[in-house]
Image: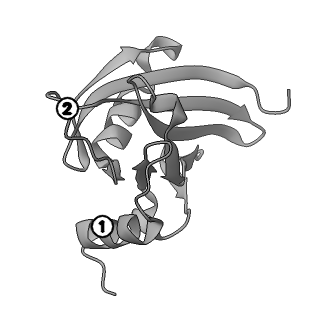
């Protein structure tokens, strides 16, 4: 009630290695005003830790972008999820991206944790025994970070 959601934009893409490919807007509210931002966020997303040898196609991912009306203007919150059976049961590790639209018309990102430069996620299938240390190593290697 204090900061109502103004709109919801959904981008659908496929996971290719650790990046999203073939991103396209599948749900657009607010007359498409935030579609470009949603596509930009999808192109910057990094997802590590998804392992599957039983699938022949790239797993589908949706990036949700929620637009809020806040006291100072507009805020955007984005996060990805897997759009496949069991995707809602996966364990997601990372931080949602948060940005505020300033009066000059530019987005200012609210910095999150440093893992994956605040833009990435690590996932683990429910009940899968891969250790977070392994996922962290993968994250750091993908981002070119030093140990």
In depth, the one of 124 and 147 nearer the eye is 124
Label 1 crowd (10 A; few <14 / some 14-19 / many >=20): some
Left or right relative to 139: residue 65: right
Q: Which residue does the image show at 30% across and 67% down from the upper left?
A: 138
Left or right relative to 43: residue 130: right
Which of the 4 quarters of the picture holds residue 49? bottom left
Circle 2 SS class: loop
Label 2 crowd (10 A; few <14 / some 14-19 / many >=20): some
Would you place residue 18 above or below residue 147 in this image? above
Left or right relative to 136: residue 141: left
Q: Position of residue 132 (x, y in %)?
A: 46, 65
Would you place residue 64 above or below residue 124 in this image? above
Give the alpha-carbon distance from disc 1 to disc 2, as whole Å: 19 Å
Q: Which residue does the image show at 20% across and 30% down from the upper left?
A: 55
Can you identify the residue that label 2 sits on?
58
Q: Which residue does the image show at 34% across and 66% down from the upper left?
A: 139
- Say which label, 1 or 2, has the lower sequence index: 2
In depth, the one of 30 and 18 nearer the eye is 18
Q: Position of residue 80 (x, y in %)?
A: 44, 38
- Are circles 1 and 2 on residues that touch, CB within 8 Å? no
Indicate which disc residue 8 carries. Answer: none
Indicate which disc residue 138 carries. Answer: 1
Q: Which residue does the image show at 53% across and 34% down from the upper left?
A: 89
In depth, the one of 33 and 140 nearer the eye is 140
Image quarter where the C terminus lies is bottom left
Q: Position of residue 71 (x, y in %)?
A: 78, 39
Numbered-mark total: 2
Task: Find the residue positioned furthest to the bottom.
Answer: 147
Task: Find the residue positioned furthest to the left.
Answer: 56
Image quarter where the N terminus lies is top right
Circle 1 SS class: helix
Left or right relative to 138: residue 63: right
């Amino acid at each position: 009630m204090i900061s109502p959601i103004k709109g919801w934009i959904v981008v659908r893409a496929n996971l290719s290695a650790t990046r999203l490919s073939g991103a396209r807007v599948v749900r657009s509210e607010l007359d498409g005003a935030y579609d470009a931002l949603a596509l930009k966020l999808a192109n910057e997303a990094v997802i590590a830790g998804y392992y599957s040898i039983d699938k022949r196609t790239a797993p589908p991912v949706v990036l949700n972008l929620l637009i809020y009306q806040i006291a100072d203007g507009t805020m955007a919150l984005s996060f990805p999820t897997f759009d496949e059976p069991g995707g809602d049961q996966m364990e997601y590790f990372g931080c949602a991206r948060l940005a505020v639209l300033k009066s000059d018309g530019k987005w200012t990102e609210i910095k999150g944790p440093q893992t994956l430069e605040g833009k990435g996620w690590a996932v683990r299938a429910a009940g899968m025994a891969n250790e977070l240390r392994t996922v962290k190593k993968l994250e750091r290697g993908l981002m070119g970070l030093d140990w």
